[in-house]
Image (cartoon, helix red, strand yellow):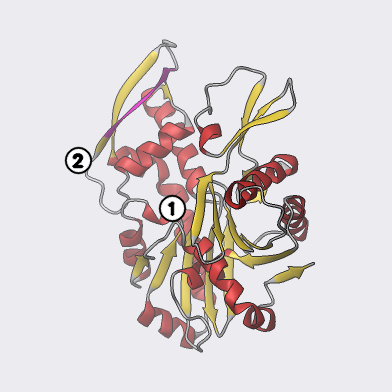
Amino acid sequence: MNIGIDLGTANVLITMGKQGVVLNEPSVIAFNKKTEEVIAVGFEAKKMEGRTPDHITVIRPLEDGVISDHNMTKSMIKFFIEKVTGKQLIMPDIIICIPSAITDVENRAVIEAAKTAGAKKVWLLEEPLAALIGAGIDISNPDGNMVIDFGGGTTDTAVVSMNGIVVRRSIRTAGNKLDRAIVKYIAARYKVLIGEKTAEEAKITAANIYNPDGTKTTVVKGRHLIRGLPERIEITDYDIYEAIIDPVAEIIAAVKSVLEQTPPELAADIFKNGIVITGGGGLLGGFDKLLTSELGVRCYNADRPLESVAIGASIAFGKMDELLDGFKHVSMLT
């Protein structure tokens, strides 16, 4: 029983054996403080966000790509593994994908969570590698390939050649930070307070960060900060652009810094091959076009950007000997 886990800040994706992606649910858990019981996980918990009484708290146990609440993360991983295995008495081998900049302490927290969930062996695989493998790119050749994994908590950029990362950078600026920027902007400009979930929906619906012209619109609902009453306003793609262009610029600057450190021969390969974008953030309207314009290199989304990392984890089981020999960034723990 081989299980691959993309332990994302926004969503957890799980692959199992040859079945492909068998689970894709929000990284959210609801906890009853009175009874000290977990009452919902994933989709069911996400429905409760912003709608619970004081004794029920809805938690996102991963923040900016790392575990912020160890106990809740353990409960969440265990719940998801039992959901896909049908609570069978098995001890699976698990590959968990992690951001490039994760610390040893954070590594241990991830491993402990998987062990608690019943894992026999645990491997940690850096997300950029899993993303490239899952995007169908052969990384064993002496040919430079570059990936931008734009997730919910972190954006990982890496140049890979001959089964190894040559240059990498991970920043904790990603989809969730964009959502918070939209909340802040709407409050400042329209004096309306909206939730992060509403901000995310507005970003998905109306964002166009390449050439916003005000023609794409969406309606958001919240509470007027002065009157204190429910409010409904229409915002445009230019509003979204104004709200998120600064964090997007941080991501572009990180990508440029990786390119600046890339050896000339590999840079030539990247110019030829283009840069692949994975993760849900890559679907941000106009992001690929803006990157192409800023970098002068073709940037494109993977065929299944949301699932690339999880698919890469699944494929990695078939490359285990190669990974253990050629990837120093893969840690095996028994």
Name the one closer to the observer, 32 or 231. 32
**How many other residues sit within 10 Å of disc 2, few (<14), some (14-19) or many (≥20)?**
few
Tell me the SS state at disc 1. Answer: helix
Q: Position of residue 201 (x, y in %)?
A: 38, 37
Magenta part mainly helix, strand or loop?
strand
Q: Which mark is residue 92?
A: none
Name the one closer to the observer, 218 or 31. 31
In the rendered image, which quarter is residue 206 located in? top left
Q: Which mark is residue 281?
A: 1
- Is residue 86 magenta-colored? no
Q: Nearer the viewer, mark 1 or mark 2?
A: 1
Residue type at the position of mark 1: Gly
Quarter of the image that includes the C terminus:
bottom right
Instruction: Give the vertical position of 167 relative to 22 (above or below).
Output: below
Question: Residue shown at 68%/59% (left/top)?
Answer: 102
Q: Position of residue 297 (x, y in %)?
A: 35, 73
Query: How far apart are labels 1 and 2 at the CA level?
Result: 22 Å
**Left-right relation of 58 to 270:** right
**Left-right relation of 208 to 329:** left
Label 2 sits on residue:
215
**Residue located farthest toward the left when viewing the structure as drawn:** 215
